[in-house]
Image: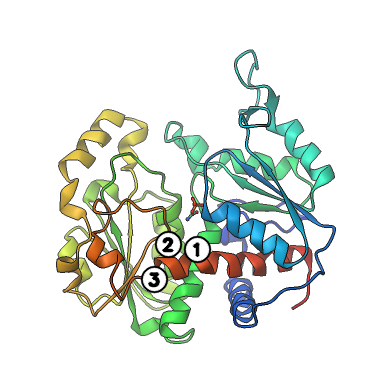
Amino acid sequence: MLSDAPNIRNFVSMANWSDQDLLELLDTADALKSRKFRSREGEGKVLGLLFFNPSLRTKVSFEVAAAHFGATTSIISPGQGSWTLETEIGAIMNGNKTEHVKEAVQVLSRYCDAIGVRAFSTLKDKNADMSEAVIRDITQYADVPVINLESAMEHPCQSMADWMTIRELFGKNQLADKKLVLTWAPHPFPLPQAVPNSVLEMASRSGIQLTLACPPEMVPEDPFLSRYKEQCRQKGHEMVIEHDQQKALQGADVVYAKSWAAPVIYDEPLREAQLRKEIYKDWTLSGDKMKATNDAYFMHCLPVRRNVVVTDDVIDGPRARHIDEAENRLHAQKAILMKLWNLSL
Ligand code: CP
């Protein structure tokens, strides 16, 4: 949960944006989508996109979003055509990192009108991850708006697309009667907490009834968990945490499947790997399991491992909405760019 520099509006954390701000962005995104909006008002502006990790949707949707305003993008992939970048403050740079983000981001600020940053957790340094050290430092070096393209603990652009999607499914004022289940899913590798956190943030802010279905060892830690519980309470619901997946799915209107690593990974990575192996198959989301739901929609941020996270019959079925979510990344991000660049609708 990052705070912005006083004089710059960033989009680095949902926590820095009020419900009212976010709802206005969603209304703008809806309008942009329905009008197939294009303008040239952003002509001459440049969006820098710094990717420490791979991407399909985030990269292309931001390139297209910028193009829809007449703006351009510059993609920086450290170590792949641009210098490798050190992120640690105080590092003795006698290894394979050529440049520090401190210089790189200050330089990019002189060229670009906003900078998007993707920097995943490495699941090695809990304090650095929990404090969002990498993107926090980058926002301090930048003197143009910074957009979080997925950091250690948050993926706020995904949150906005997901919120937009559930509003489309149920109506923007009809969420209180609906039940969203975020279910843990198997994966061969340990994955960061950013997307599940962002689903929980979005759901707890949206007013939908929220159930988290996961093995006991996978429950997210405080301060994140307490925040989601409190936000649900403020919307008039208790967040439910259920370790029996089949029970959790009962009556669900939307099921969001995602894998993440057990928090114990920072201290005992071998135990975490063993844990995921033991429960591996039990949590795959299947058509049989979905029969317990209220004919629920299926959601996933993508990329997804078929027949590991979710079976083909669900993801190829009539209630799957993962492609709509991916499309909505474009519209939600256009709304964010409009706000940060003060463009008109
Ligand atoms: N959901 C998402 O962020 O997709 P990419 O990793 O492909 O950008």
- Judging from the image, what secondary structure is the residue with disc 2 in? helix
Q: Residues within 10 Å of mark 3 (few under 14, many from 20)?
A: many
Mark 3 is on which residue type? Arg
What's the residue at 16%, 74% (across, down)?
A: 292
Sequence-wise first label, 3 or 2: 2
Q: Against 312, is 186 above or below?
A: above
* Above or below: residue 134 compared with residue 170: above
Which quadrant of the view contains residue 123?
top left
Q: Are marks 1 and 2 in contact (CB under 8 Å)?
A: yes
Neighbor class of circle 1 (other Cα within 10 Å; few <14, some 14-19, many 20+) is many
Query: Residue 293 at what x, y percent from top left?
Result: 21, 75
Disc 2 residue type?
Answer: Val
Q: Nearer the viewer, residue 341 or 222?
A: 341
The quadrant holding residue 209 is bottom left
Residue extending farthest to the top is 94
Dividing the image into 4 quarters, which one contains the C terminus? bottom right
Residue 321 is labelled as: 3
Instruction: Name the residue nearer the viewer: 115 or 209.
Output: 115
Q: CA distance from mark 1 to mark 2?
A: 6 Å
Distance CA(mark 3)–CA(mark 2): 15 Å
Residue 159 tag number: 1
Q: Secondary structure at mark 3?
A: loop
Q: Give me the residue at 56% from left, 54% from top.
A: 58
- Element under label 1? helix
Q: Find residue 10 and report its horizontal and vertical position in percent.
A: 69, 56
Task: Say whether residue 113 is left or right of residue 322.
Answer: right
Picture residue at 59% right of the left edge, 52% below the top: 59
Q: Is residue 294 visible?
A: yes
Q: Which residue is mark 2?
A: 199
Q: Residues within 10 Å of mark 2 (few under 14, many from 20)?
A: many
**Front label number (3 vs 1):** 3
